[in-house]
């Protein structure tokens, strides 16, 4: 339809993308062959067929296993380059991407190779396609705060190449308050903070992300709807939510996209953005997410334009760059 064509063609930003979650099965098999490692699946089709999840944890188990094929800077470069080609095709003008260093340093991959490979692809895409970027280092919340602090220390020589910090992985049982000290350190280093909260976890985790970690943006945040005072705060303070519709359906946060609350939150005046989260695993990139929402939620032209604008408003671009894009 015309609305789908409009959404696809509009300039947009993506603010919630795990680079490890953009690993398509074809590249996973290519890298496995390169490194002489065996994936426990016969072929690309068998791996893709395994992408049938019950919840966040069942996805994370596969996501961390898949990341095992990423071993050198060239691998991270190839991964990021492939994502940015999709980003350019979807008319993304700006991306803010997460990487999970602990998944890789644990396997002996040097921090320098992870950041260097990702960044080389980001700089190339900026030159080739004009896509600007921010790089966000995310801590794994199922690990200890001490592990996160050690990771921050390991990243210290590269902090000029990191634009902010985030918090992801298994949410329930791992509240933001578990990471109060490491995020205080991050803020001392001048790093802006975002956090996954209210994806599977309760509204209390969103309050903690805001009040204890001083997050300036909430990743997912969809369970805010259970707490009207929280919704009012997110609206009053215009704290953006990076919503990931196809992810929420794949991980059974919502039984069906038609049940999703993003349109209600948008109409309530919250700064809602649409993002892909882990596009290789969840069945789509940014435009696929827009298309699915247009179909399931009957979004209007005004809604679509607002969502695209919000993606720039909620970004960490400076005001001059936002003014050029809005
Ligand atoms: N890591 C990658 N994708 C994630 C998600 N949707 N929630 C939490 N951690 C993640
Ligand atoms: Zn995420």
Image (cartoon, helix red, strand yellow):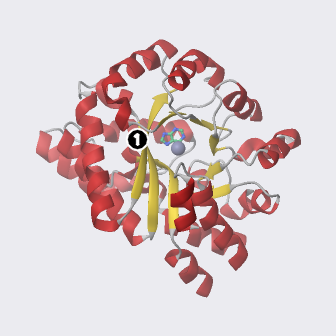
Instruction: Judge left or right: residue 153 versus residue 121.
Output: right
Q: Residue at (38%, 47%) from the top-left corner? A: 19
Q: Residue at (47%, 28%) from the top-left corner? A: 139
Q: Is residue 121 above or below residue 193?
A: below
Q: Position of residue 102 (x, y in %)?
A: 37, 27
Q: Position of residue 26 (x, y in %)?
A: 26, 57
Q: Residue at (21%, 36%) from the top-left corner? A: 71
Report whether residue 43 is seen: no
Q: How many marks?
A: 1
Which residue is denoted by mark 1 in the rendering?
63
Q: Quadrant of residue 266?
A: bottom right
Image quarter of the C terminus: bottom right
- Asked if disc 1 is less than 8 Å from ligand 1, the answer is yes
Instruction: Judge left or right: residue 309 versus residue 105.
Output: right
Identify the secondary structure beneath mark 1: helix
Q: Position of residue 321 (x, y in %)?
A: 51, 59
């Amino acid at each position: 339809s015309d609305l789908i064509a409009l959404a696809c063609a509009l300039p947009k930003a993506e603010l919630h993308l795990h680079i490890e979650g953009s690993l398509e099965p074809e590249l996973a098999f290519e890298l496995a062959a390169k490194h002489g490692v065996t994936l426990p699946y016969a072929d690309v089709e068998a791996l893709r067929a395994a992408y049938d999840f019950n919840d966040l944890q069942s996805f994370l188990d596969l996501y961390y296993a898949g990341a095992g094929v990423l071993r050198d800077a060239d691998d991270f470069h190839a991964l990021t380059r492939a994502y940015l080609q999709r980003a350019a095709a979807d008319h993304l003008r700006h991306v803010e991407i997460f990487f999970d260093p602990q998944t890789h340093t644990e396997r002996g991959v040097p921090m320098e190779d992870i950041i260097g490979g990702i960044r080389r692809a980001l700089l190339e895409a900026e030159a080739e396609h004009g896509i600007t970027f921010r790089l966000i280092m995310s801590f794994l919340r199922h690990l200890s705060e001490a592990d996160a602090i050690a990771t921050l220390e390991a990243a210290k020589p590269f902090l000029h190449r990191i634009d902010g910090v985030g918090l992801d992985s298994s949410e329930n049982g791992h509240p933001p308050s578990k990471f109060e000290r490491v995020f205080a350190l991050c803020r001392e280093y001048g790093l802006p903070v975002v956090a996954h909260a209210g994806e599977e976890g309760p509204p209390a985790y969103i309050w903690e992300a805001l009040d204890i970690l001083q997050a300036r943006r909430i990743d997912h945040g969809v369970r805010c709807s259970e707490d009207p005072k929280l919704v009012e705060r997110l609206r009053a303070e215009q704290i953006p939510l990076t919503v990931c519709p196809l992810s929420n359906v794949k991980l059974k946060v919502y039984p069906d996209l038609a049940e999703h609350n993003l349109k209600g939150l948008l109409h309530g005046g919250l700064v809602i953005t649409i993002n892909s989260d882990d596009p290789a695993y969840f069945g789509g990139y940014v435009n696929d997410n827009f298309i699915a929402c247009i179909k399931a939620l009957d979004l209007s032209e005004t809604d679509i334009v607002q969502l695209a604008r919000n993606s720039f408003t909620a970004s960490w671009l400076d005001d001059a760059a936002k003014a050029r894009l809005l």
